[in-house]
Image (tube, rainbow, N blue to C red):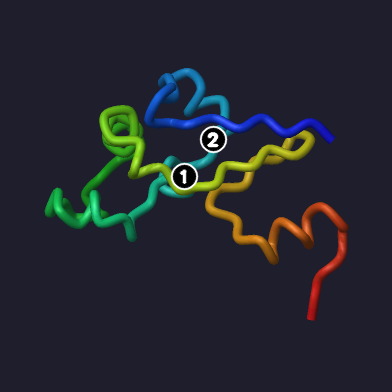
């Protein structure tokens, strides 16, 4: 298995890369609404459209849910260790 690590702060994602990772899904799945950086903005989550969220992530990488894991053709945002283990092994832990 190949693992590629990237520091979003040193090498930010481009709009094209974000769109490719989203695979046509809503940007809210990639956006970290729980981030202190989002809370300091004072914005209302329900008023933000996909383009707004992408623009915010481009300006502030802390707003991207991490880690981003791509396995095969699927992309997972903010997956914890347990979920990643289940994805990799193909079975749920109890």
Q: Is residue 53 above or below residue 33?
A: above
Q: Residue at x 71, y 56 (%)?
A: 84
Quarter of the image with the N terminus in it: top right
* Residue 66 point in image, percent of width and height: 50, 47
Q: Secondary structure at mark 1?
A: loop
Judge from the rendering whether residue 77 lies leftward or rightward of residue 87; answer left or right: left
The circle drawn on residue 22 is 2
Q: Residue at x 79, y 81 (%)?
A: 94
Count the numbered circles shown.
2
Q: Residue at x 42, y 19 (%)?
A: 14
Q: Nearer the viewer, residue 21 or 51?
A: 21
Distance Cα–Cα, label 1 vs label 2: 7 Å
Report the residue that reaches farthest toward the bottom. Answer: 94
Q: Rate crowding at label 2 as few (under 14), some (14 to 19) or many (20 or more) other CA atoms within 10 Å.
A: some
Q: Secondary structure at mark 2?
A: helix
The circle drawn on residue 74 is none
Judge from the rendering whether residue 43 lies leftward or rightward of residue 23; answer left or right: left
Q: Quadrant of residue 44?
A: bottom left
* Residue 27 point in image, percent of width and height: 43, 41
Q: Is residue 81 above or below residue 37?
A: below
Disc 1, disc 2: CB below 8 Å? yes
Q: Nearer the viewer, residue 42 or 52?
A: 42
Q: Which residue is mark 1?
A: 30
Q: Residue at x 41, y 42 (%)?
A: 64
* Residue 7 point in image, percent of width and height: 48, 31
* Residue 28 point in image, percent of width and height: 41, 47
């Amino acid at each position: 298995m190949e693992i590629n690590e990237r520091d979003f702060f040193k090498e930010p994602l481009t709009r094209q890369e974000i769109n490719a990772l989203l695979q046509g899904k809503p940007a809210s799945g990639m956006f970290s609404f729980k981030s202190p950086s989002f809370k300091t903005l004072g914005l209302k989550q329900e008023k933000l459209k996909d383009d707004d969220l992408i623009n915010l992530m481009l300006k502030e990488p802390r707003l991207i849910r991490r880690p981003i894991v791509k396995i095969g053709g699927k992309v997972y945002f903010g997956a914890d260790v347990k979920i990643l283990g289940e994805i990799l092994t193909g079975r749920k832990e109890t």
